[in-house]
Structures are given as structure tokens and as C-alpha cells.
Amino acid sequence: MSAWSSSWQLPDQIADVLPSEARHIEELRRLFLDSARGYGYELVMPPLLEHLESLLTGTGEALGLQTFKLVDQLSGRTLGLRADTTPQVARIDAHLLNRSGVARLCYCGPVLHTRAAHPHATREPLQFGAEIYGHAGLEADLETQMLALQCLRASGVTELCVDMADVRIVSSLLAGAAIDAATLARLHAALAAKDASALDHLMAGLDGGISSAAREGLKALLQLYGDEKILIEAEKALPPMPGVREALQNLKWLADRIAQVDGTRVSFDLADLRGYAYYSGTRFAVYGHGAELARGGRYDEVGAVFGRNRPAAGFSLDLKELVSVLPPRALKAAIRAPWGEAAGLREAIAHLRAAGETVVCVLPGHEHELTEFDCDSELANLAGQWVVQPVQKPA
């Protein structure tokens, strides 16, 4: 392959967004931001890159591996291209706003990943998210879940499933155990994969500090997934530790309210904690059209590295991935107008555009070309007046 023919090719899992899909993404971006504003969320726009230590401190190894690094030619310091916006929003809440009460913040912008989340995903997601700081009660968890559902339903997804868990169940069972971060990650992976032999092997390697009841509880988690009956089974199968009981009660409180949203099912997988490195309580994922469309939960520790450890809950989603599973939108209706410089024609076109109409002027010699717009009307000169009339289509 010649250098010329390969120069325009993009990196793997990086792609241009073409007009029809771009319009769909932009319409949803506006819809979601308006929905968040309706709940009282304020828009923030963090920078795409920051000093690496600010971007990654306290976020865990997984996010560090997902982050592109480069050297700032002005300062010589290492910069990172953000792979997740949540730590940046936590920094804004802690240092720039520094409010004593509740802060509701939302955002929408690109993030970059060194590796895609799955084989068909982009490495340049367009991340939308909403986060609420300053309230420790379940009301904040519920509000973020309700906003996520409202956004997804407004996008055209009618059948949704909210899958829930709580990281405090596993952390309570492991309380007091001498376990390093790498082993803990493997243990979480074994639980999520429902791998009983790997779990047994990992527990056998622990030096102590974990009771036999806790070991049995961890093994029981492998079977604790399904509908609302799972919470009843969990109360019987898990040891009566305070953290475990509180987590199950919180999940039931949330599930009872989410289940009242039309077209929404609730499920549980109490062992699956993949991808939730900094979550501190309830977590959730929303599924529809056979894909995970949004994820979120409570992450009270996210602001600690910025010197302000206060309650936080939220969610995020990738608009590009969402659009990829939705039916394509019809062409946008528009008005076709002839090209011309007559004052009356130019005034009519300007008036229509000011009223919010899309007016496509047909350039000479291009009368039969197709575009992103469905010109179902045309601007025609009738008796000296420019008027909009339906396009006469062939029978």
C-alpha cells in the first residue's frame, strides 16, 4: 500500500461520524442536556487534557491503563487525555465551586481510550453524564437513575432493564482480610465471571481475617443474580453483617421505585462489580436493545484526593454507542429554494430560516442531487409572491 493511499486512514476503532449519524448524536446531546437542566443540573466543560497526576490520582490502575499520555512542550510535564470525565467533575466540585450544599453538574464531551471497551466500540466515546454532590441519602441515587431512564426513554428506547448491585456487600464480607489490590481485582473478576474454582483458589490464598461465614457468603454471591426474588434469597444466604443488611435494604428501596417506571424491569447481580473501581455503594447499569446503555452509582470517595470527601452519585453513557443501537432517523424535513439574488427571494429565505426552518438553496446544475435533507416543500414564486408549497412528487 502506498503512503498516499494510507495517509487518510484513521487509527483502529477511531472513525469519522457522517451527517445522518452526526445529526442523530447532536439531537440526543441537546435532548439529554435539556433533560438534565430540567432536573436542575448545571453544565460544566472540563478540559480534554490535564496534568497526569491531577487526572489519575485516586482513580485506580484500570483508568490509568486507558489514558493516553503525552509531554507538554511548554512545561515538560506529563499530560493525560481524559478517559473518564467523572474525576474532573469531582475536582470542579471540590476546588472551583466549593459549595457547602448540593451541587448538580452535567457534562457532554469526548473522552479517549487506549483500548476500546469491546471489539465493536469506539476508542473516542462522546460521554454524557450527570452527577449530584453533597447528599448522602438514597434520594440522590434515585434521582440519577430516574434521569438516566428519562434520557434513554426520550431517545426512543422503550424496554429498559436496570441491573443493580452494591459494592458494600463484597467489601463487608472481606472486612479485616489482608488482601492486596491485585488479588482483590482477581477476586472481583472471579465473582463477576461466576468462576467458583477461581474464587476458591483465591480465598485459599488469603492469610486470614476472613471468617468461614464470610467465605460462604462470597460463594453464595455466585448464585445471587436474577429478578427481585434475589434480594429475599440474599437475606437468607448472606451473613447478617450490618453493611450487608444495609446494602440489601437500599437495593430494595431503589428497586421498588424504579420498577414503577413504565417499561422498566429491575434485576440484580450481586457479584458483578466489573468496571466500578471507585464506586462506594449502590451501582447500576441500564440495558436496552441488547446492550449496556448507561452505568452509574454512588462514589462518595471520588473527591477525597482533591481534599473534599463528600457524598456523590451519578451516571454516564456514550452517545455514539447509544446511537449505534437505535434505528436510524428519517431525513430531516427541509424547504427547497431556487438559487437567486432577487431581493424578494432572499428576504423570503431569510424569514424562513429565522423562523427555524431549514432552507436548501439548489445551486445551478445540481437540481437532482440527494442530501441529508428531505425537501418535502419548495419555495415558489406565485403571482409575484414567494410562498412555500408541497413538492409535487411523481405518482
Image (cartoon, grey):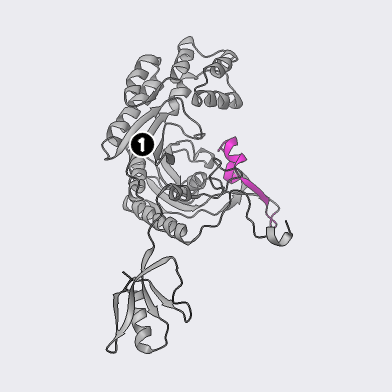
235 vs 49: above or below: above
The three-letter code of the residue at mark 1 reads: Cys
Q: Residue furthest front?
A: 395
Residue at image point 36% right, 85% down = 345
Q: In this orientation, which residue lies closer to the viewer: 309 or 74?
A: 74
Q: Residue furthest right?
A: 2
Along the line of sight, the residue nearer the viewer: 105 or 182: 182
Q: Residues within 10 Å of mark 1 (few under 14, many from 20)?
A: many
Look at the image and tell me in which quarter the N terminus lies.
bottom right
Q: Is residue 184 magenta?
A: no
Residue bearing mark 1: 161
Tell me the residue at 31%/28% (across/down). 252
Mark count: 1
Q: Position of residue 203 (x, y in %)?
A: 55, 15
Q: Which residues are magenta?
A: 54-75
Left-right relation of 113 to 369: right
Please give the name of the residue rendered at 59% of the width and 23% of the height, measured from the top-left corner: 183
In this view, the residue in front, 286 or 131, is: 286
| Residue 171, percent from left and from top | 48, 24
Would you identify the image quadrant in which residue 24 lies? bottom left
Vertical comparison of 97 with 254: above or below: below
Q: Secondary structure at mark 1?
A: strand
Q: Is residue 36 visible?
A: yes
Q: Quadrant of residue 374?
A: bottom left
Confirm whether residue 78 shows in the render. Answer: no
Image coordinates of residue 321 in percent, x first then y, are 47, 47
